[in-house]
Image (cartoon, rainbow, N blue to C red):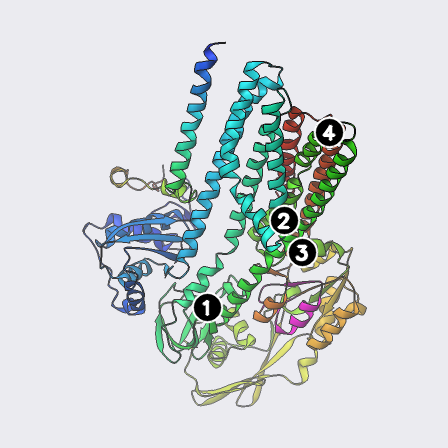
Amino acid sequence: MNILILMIPMALLLGFGFVVAFLWSTSQGQFDDVETPAHRILQDDPQERNCREKPRTQPS
Amino acid sequence: MDIVLPLSECLYCKTLLSPPQPSFCCAACEALYKLENSHDKGIKKPSFSLSLEKYKFLDEQLSAHNTCEVTFHAEGLHCSSCVHLLERLPEFDSNILESRVHFGESTVHVRVKPNTSWAQVAALIEELGYAPTAIVSSEKLLEKQKQENRKSLMRIGVAGACAGNMMLFVVPVYAGLAGTLAELFNWISFALFLPILFYSAWPFYQGAWNFLKYRAVNVDLPIAVAMLSGFILSTYNLVFRVGGPVYYDSTASFIFLILSSRYLLKRVQQKHLSGDYLLEGLQNHRHLTPGAQITVLQGEKIPADGVLLSSQAEVDMSLFNGESLPQSFREGMSLFAGSTLLSPKILLLVEKIALETRLGKILQQLRSDSVQKSHFVSLTDKLAQGLIVTVSSIALLFFIFYSAVDATAALERALALIVIACPCALAFGTPLAYGLSLRKAQKQGILIRNSDIFEKLQHIENIFFDKTGTLTEGRLKLALIDGDLSEEDRKIILALETKSSHTIAFALRHAWSSLQHLPEVEDHQEILGEGVSGLVHNTRYSLTRSQELNILDYIAVEYRIEGRLMAHLFFEDPLRLESKEILGKLAQFQLHILSGDKSPRVTKIASLCGIPEARCHAELSPENKLKEIQAAKHTCMIGDGANDSLALKAADVGIAVKGSVDLSLMSADVYFTRGGLQPLLELMQISKEARRTVRRNLVISLFYNGLGGALALGGFINPMMAAILMPISSVLIIISSLRGTR
């Protein structure tokens, strides 16, 4: 049972770390907008777009 | 197998297009495609000598603030391509450093180099196809709202983390752990409860303080009392009576749940308020002066009420009447601020600006109404209030009588009762259910001013329908032509009606929209209520109301050349396709028709719908409609048009449908943004579900409070039972609300 002396502080510390991370990211505005990033990701990177094969509309 | 699709794809985003659209699904896609395929990758500055003028006031307004960052509300932002296009603003103008889009709020936040012209930025956004509105006056409000949301989220996060971790240490104790380790675990729970007590629960203290100070009825005081008594009882047991019951975990998870559900509600309600942008948009056009002539470009929102000076315009009026089809306007007709121009640029003579406009008045009205909404929530708070009074008096009485037997146990059980019978479940159950129902209704195009409607609809017995625009399309249609009309005749008729804004003119334009190259009309005369006449190639043509044929259920018009009768044109207002079926589904109600229209037409519609003639009243003045409504009990009136406003107001539930003018919007409780009667059935369904959900929530929380209270007084409750019972009741209510409003 002595291992608890180590494990309890570690568990609490881990939890505390995540709370701090959450508080920090919230204060940075990470959760202000949860909708736009879903649209943003649809955009190809500029380089990506240039290399992409030309029209996909050709009949296969 | 090769199948060549007749449908084309948007060249940019590959959305399938319906044939009339050339190669792009929207302006954003077109702009992005051009941007990426243009060889000169350099900065291309759109020419906006014209629009710069329009946004000059921004520079004056913002120079005082001396800011490098402004948020614009970009009207028209609707798809992923829009997001990408607006986030690439820096590529268009080197003065712009960064732009970030907020899709949900339709805003774009722009950061620029010092001393950049904001007019330039606004004009650029406009050039890309959006109507920018700088959010200046309500910026602080938005910022405050954002900060508050962040704070609530942080409080929820802390409460959730503490409550969750607490459970880890409480479970072994429940499982039978005893001795030093159990005591240590309880002390850890105590430590984990402190952040909740001093940070997460802060809003409850503020609410409780307001309650005491201003007598503002709310549920925060009972929550705070329950939480504090839980904390005090547990700490007392922890310090003085080793092994006594400890309630930290259940109290913590309860606080977490209340905070979460409140946050959810707040976000739903914040979405309701987006109409403010429209109002601010109008305010931004204050610099316009009545009498000025302005140019409106294609796709722009018309900034002020005014008279059309160009020969014709196609306008999307859906903001006013829910009509998805564009309406054609001719020179001299009035256009309203807030409607969108669909045809290429027009010249407009400004008549009314900002709050004076029709839209401004509606928005002001709506805004003052959204203030009233909170009134309803306080009613449920009152209900919870009653419960806490009952609970605390029971607890007090119990303590007084039982302390004769065992003082310690009496205190403990009385406090346990308060902790258990906390009315939170009751207090958040009803608003949660109604809030979710309002959101659901809003998604379906049903705007509800007050959630009382859900209760009121239950008692409805009589439903009164207006005929025009409610049961019928509300638009005249060319039904049949008696006589021969050559194409030349049709062109002449159209030319005669060109400038008219009469419904017959709209019907003709609609029916013969393919005709082009209309002949010139000289000596054009429009006799109000009679018809029009004019000279084409020195021949007098006229189109007038027929006197003798008007008794029929059609509206007849005579076409004459040099006074000689050539043909009769018959117009009717056709019954909506779905009206009959929907009225059939409303058979449990007494259905009535109230119409200002002529008797034969009303009777015809009534027989088509299966409404007995006895309950169908024609040729009614607004006052007579009001009398009909007042004569009946438990009424619901559905109508549009100004002449229904008195009736809508008098009815228990007034519903304004598509095409309603401002007056009916002010008097009605519900507004359908979609045409037809289908939303009525949906509204009935939603309110039925809402009522059922609320009732279920009440039963759950009362059952739970009763059971928990009895157990607590009997001394049977222990922390483990509380830990199980309390969250279960809340989760049940949340699930019940979510299911009921799916």
Residue B310, relative to residue B465: is it above or below? below
Q: Are marks 3 and 1 in contact (CB under 8 Å)?
A: no
> Magenta span covers which residues?
B639-660
Across and down, in percent, residue B484 comes to: 56, 77
- Image quarter of residue B692: top right
Circle 1 sits in a helix, a strand or a loop, which is it? Answer: loop
Vertical comparison of B254 with B205: above or below: above
Q: Secondary structure at mark 3?
A: helix
- Identify the secondary structure beneath mark 2: helix
Residue type marked 1: Ser
Identify the disc placed on residue B434: 2
Most foreground residue, B570 or B577:
B577
Q: Are the numbered discs 3 and 1 placed on the same chain, yes or no?
A: yes
Q: Which residue is mark 4?
A: B407
The span from disc 3 to disc 2 (Cα, nearest Å) is 9 Å
Reading the image, the residue beneath label 3 is: B452
Q: Mark 3 vs mark 1: which is more N-terminal? A: 3
What residue is pinned by disc 1?
Answer: B514
- Identified by mark 4, the residue type is Ala
The type of residue carrying mark 2 is Tyr
Q: Is residue B341 visible?
A: no
| Rendering coords of residue B559 (x, y %) | 56, 82
On whether residue B554 falls in the magenta region, the answer is no
Q: Residues within 10 Å of mark 3 (few under 14, many from 20)?
A: some
Per the model, the C-alpha gap separating discs 3 and 1 is: 49 Å
Residue depth check, mark 4 versus mark 2: number of the one nearer the observer? 4
